[in-house]
Image (cartoon, rainbow, N blue to C red):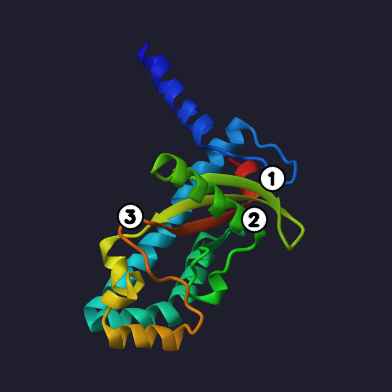
Amino acid sequence: MKIYKLLYLPILSVLVFSCTKKDDVPISLIEEMKVREVGEKYALELLRTLKQNLMKAMNNGGPYNAVEFCSTKAQYLTKLVEQKIDHGVKLKRTSFKYRNPLNKPDKYEAEALKIFEKYYKEYGQLRPYYIQKVREQDGQYYYRYYKPLVVKPLCLICHGDPEKMDPQLYQKIKEKYPEDKAIGYKEGDFRGVVRVSIPVKVINRL
């Protein structure tokens, strides 16, 4: 009975939380489990790298230095993590309320964001992941793994209610990002996702 439960629960979790068909390309349960394992690993690696460097910037110059870090280093560090991973894996953070225009969602990312938002509204919590299989601009098929991001108290310093923010800090943000959308959040809000694009050949080798 215990063995049955251990086997049943992971499979049930996959069936409940997955939505794994895109462009009429079905994904098997085995594929999905592999993509989930690889995608979660690389999403966490990117988040750890960004958080460590953001905290260093905060400690060395407070929120003003953090804004400078995000505008000049976040994309660079994302590319460094991609290079470290190699295998053709591509990483991105995206949201409908993006701050950097480079993080604007494409059509597949927009679809994923809508699914997270819908689930959050219906159940009051975020689904743990979402997976697609899509043909990208290079003509190759990729699995896309999406990990949701939640607004933490520290995030509100630069992403909270503008009326409660340091006026000078808010002005600096507006100068760096004239078309900023990433504002007005509350703790616990759905912020966006980390997207991990994994070439099909990487999963097939596992």
Q: Residue at x 43, y 61 (%)?
A: 46
In the rendered structure, which disc, 1 or 3, sits on the residue that comes first in sequence? 1
Element type where label 2 sits in the image: helix
Residue 192: x %, y % from top left: 47, 59
Give the secondary structure at mark 1.
loop
The residue type indicated by label 3 comes to: Gly
Q: Is residue 95 above or below residue 124?
A: below
Residue bearing mark 1:
22
**Could you say where residue 169 lies in the image, as x and y percent from the top left?**
31, 84
Query: Quick one: which residue is furthest to the top in this view?
Result: 1
User: Considering depth in this image, is 202 or 116 the residue closer to the camera?
Assistant: 116
Image x and y of residue 14, in percent = 51, 33
**Decide: marks 2, 1 in contact (CB < 8 A)?**
yes
Q: Earlier in the sequence, mark 2 or mark 1?
A: 1
Q: Are marks 3 and 2 in contact (CB under 8 Å)?
A: no
Single out the mark in the foreground, 3 or 2. Answer: 3
For badge 1, the amino acid type reads: Lys
Measure the C-alpha gap from mark 1 to mark 3.
29 Å
What's the distance in space between the residues labelled 2 and 1, CA to CA? 9 Å
Is 136 on the left-hand or right-hand side of 90? right
Q: Quadrant of residue 164?
A: bottom left
**Is the N terminus in the top left, top right, bottom left or bottom right quadrant?**
top left
Is 52 displayed left or right of 199 in the figure?
Answer: left
Q: Quadrant of the C terminus?
A: top right
Say the numbered circle drawn on residue 1. none
Q: Residue furthest right?
A: 139
Look at the picture and state if 199 lies above or below 27: below
Identity of the residue drawn at 55% across and 47% down: 115
Q: Which residue is mark 2?
A: 108
Which residue is identified by label 3? 188
Of mark 3 and mark 2, the one earlier in the sequence is: 2
